[in-house]
Image (cartoon, grey):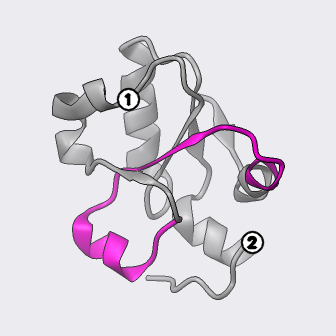
Amino acid sequence: MDEITPRELKAGLERGEPVVLLDVRQDWERRLCRLDGATHIPIEEIEYRTEELNPADEIVVFCHQGIRSAAVSEYLRQLGFPKVKNLAGGLDEWARTVDPTMPRY
């Protein structure tokens, strides 16, 4: 599985690299904290909403700790999305290493 660390993602975003951020958490989680500009498709809806994603895009999938997003990343790869990466450690790792002001839960 392809993964990207929070620090690598932040550096890429700062360089202006085009990437689709895909948040697969629940609505209540998203209300606690989020990454600006992310597309929100809860994990239980992904199989019905993949047409909202472009297989040609670089996609970074994230969740709370990286477990659900790893499953979604693998699922999308099987559907023919070759540029999908999982955010290693999820938003919890993002909050610990990139943005200590982000609420953790």
- Mark 1 lies on residue: 53
The circle drawn on residue 97 is 2
Does 77 sit left or right of 43 as displayed? Answer: right
Q: Are marks 1 and 2 in contact (CB under 8 Å)?
A: no
| Type of the residue with mark 1 | Leu
* Closer-to-camera residue (3/16): 16
Pointer 1 local density, CA inside 10 Å: few below 14, some 14–19, many at least 20 = some
Which is nearer the N-term, disc 1 or disc 2? Answer: 1
Answer with the quarter of the image where residue 14 lies.
bottom right
| Type of the residue with mark 2 | Thr
Does 96 sit left or right of 62 as displayed? Answer: right
Whole-percent x, y for residue 2 in the image: 63, 30
Q: Residue at x 44, y 27 (%)?
A: 74
* Closer-to-camera residue (19/81): 19
Q: Which residues are magenta?
A: 11-35
Above or below: residue 56 compared with residue 29: above
Residue 8 is inside the magenta segment? no
- How many tags in the picture? 2
